[in-house]
Image (cartoon, grey):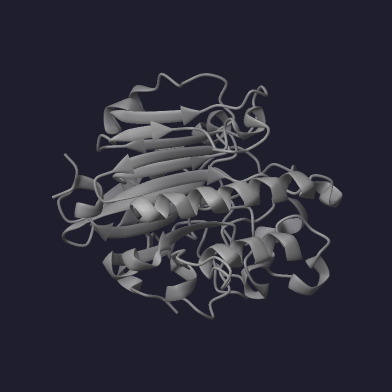
């Protein structure tokens, strides 16, 4: 039987070797990690340096009257499942779980997931074992869509976006297009941003929006470790990408009647240099060299209903990203 006062999962330390491929709003809401965890050391930016999931994973219960949302780039469901993915899901027990970069080729028939989340939408790429976005929910959505309206290449959008409608909001889950090595696909990223900006603004005129997932942009210089050397050279931190993101948060005067959005974690942690992605290469995790790419962005009028937003910094090793969680008043999702 699950403990009533907290969710706790004990597991064996992952045996897989690390791949070479690549302050707070509420301290009480962060993960509790046992002292026998490999993540007891911290990097210079204050985040742990563990390279496998902790032996014991536990989280405090939801704040009363809220639902918990979680987003995690798992860098392949098949791979993450071998490295403790299910232990995190069991401990977190979110009401809505967004998974990005799933790399699945067909809808998974996994009783572990379907028993917890009866309402699942998997957006699958037309390319084999590539990208992929999923929204797994305990609550039945009013509608579901996996398209980005107006995009000139719908095939390229497959696997990158899922929109689910609930009584009080839209959830838009994205694994946003990458600008590519050497910025070779920045043009495609700009096309995505153009049409996505129009889309999220149109949705916001109907209902408030929760945009969550891997947004593939470091919004400002404090959202990555080496901002100066990466500026306008590295995908995710270019003038085009950061301006497109800022234009969603704070629309220009020319966009009359358009609502504002808020980057929730940054709003609550204005000076903290914590990241959600640490490359497997160059010992980045140990050195605290990362990027904050995974986030929650909400319609400004929803902000007062958000009760918690945290990066689960200890949950590293199943993927090169860590999850981000947010708790929001439950009526937004349930309608009551």
In the rendered structure, the answer to whether residue 44 lies left or right of residue 73 reads right
Which residue is drawn at the image coordinates 82% and 70% (left, top)?
A: 229
In the rendered structure, the answer to whether residue 282 lies left or right of residue 32 reads right
Which residue is drawn at the image coordinates 54% and 65% (left, top)?
A: 255
Please say if 264 is above or below 176. below
Position of residue 196 measured from the top left corner of the image (x, y, whole percent): 57, 48
**In this orientation, which residue lies closer to the viewer: 1 or 218?**
218
**Where, quadrant-wise, is the N terminus in this rendering?**
top left
Which residue is drawn at the image coordinates 65% and 59% (left, top)?
A: 285
Please say if 205 is above or below 191. below
**In this orientation, which residue lies closer to the viewer: 37 or 282?**
282
Which residue is drawn at the image coordinates 79% and 74% (left, top)?
A: 228
The quarter of the displayed image where residue 119 is located: top left
Circle count: 0
Position of residue 231 measured from the top left corner of the image (x, y, whole percent): 79, 68
Please say if 174 is above or below 253. above
In the rendered structure, the answer to whether residue 81 lies left or right of residue 326 reads right
The quarter of the displayed image where residue 287 is located: bottom right
Position of residue 271 measured from the top left corner of the image (x, y, whole percent): 54, 81
Q: Visible in this render: residue 115?
A: yes
The quarter of the displayed image where residue 35 is located: bottom left
Q: Visible in this render: residue 83?
A: no
Position of residue 266 measured from the top left corner of the image (x, y, whole percent): 49, 71
**In this orientation, which residue lies closer to the viewer: 72 or 189?**
189
């Amino acid at each position: 039987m699950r403990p009533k006062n907290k969710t706790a999962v004990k597991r064996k330390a992952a045996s897989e070797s690390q791949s070479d491929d690549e302050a707070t709003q509420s301290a009480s809401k962060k993960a509790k990690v046992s002292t026998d965890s490999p993540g007891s050391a911290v990097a210079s930016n204050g985040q742990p340096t563990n390279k496998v999931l902790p032996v014991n994973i536990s989280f405090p219960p939801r704040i009363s009257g809220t639902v918990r949302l979680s987003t995690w780039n798992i860098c392949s469901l098949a791979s993450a499942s071998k490295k403790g993915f299910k232990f995190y899901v069991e401990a977190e027990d979110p009401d809505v779980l967004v998974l990005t970069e799933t790399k699945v080729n067909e809808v998974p028939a996994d009783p572990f997931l379907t028993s917890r989340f009866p309402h699942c939408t998997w957006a699958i790429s037309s390319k084999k074992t590539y990208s992929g976005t999923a929204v797994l929910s305990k609550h039945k959505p009013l509608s579901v869509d996996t398209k980005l309206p107006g995009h000139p290449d719908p095939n390229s959008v497959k696997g990158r976006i899922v929109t689910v409608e609930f009584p009080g909001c839209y959830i838009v889950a994205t694994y946003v297009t990458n600008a590519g090595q050497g910025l070779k696909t920045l043009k495609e990223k700009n096309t995505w941003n153009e049409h996505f900006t129009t889309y999220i603004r149109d949705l916001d005129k109907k209902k408030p929006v929760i945009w969550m997932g891997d947004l593939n942009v470091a919004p400002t210089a404090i959202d990555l470790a080496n901002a100066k050397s990466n500026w306008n050279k590295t995908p995710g931190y270019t003038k085009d990408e950061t301006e497109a993101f800022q234009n969603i948060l704070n629309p220009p005067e020319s966009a009359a009647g358009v609502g504002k959005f808020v980057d929730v974690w940054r709003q609550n942690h204005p000076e903290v240099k914590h990241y959600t992605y640490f490359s497997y290469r160059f010992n980045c995790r140990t050195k605290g060299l990362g990027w904050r790419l995974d986030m929650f962005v909400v319609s400004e009028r929803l902000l007062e209903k958000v009760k918690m937003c945290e990066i689960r910094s200890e949950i590293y090793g199943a993927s090169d990203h860590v999850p981000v969680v947010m708790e929001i008043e439950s009526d937004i999702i349930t309608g009551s």
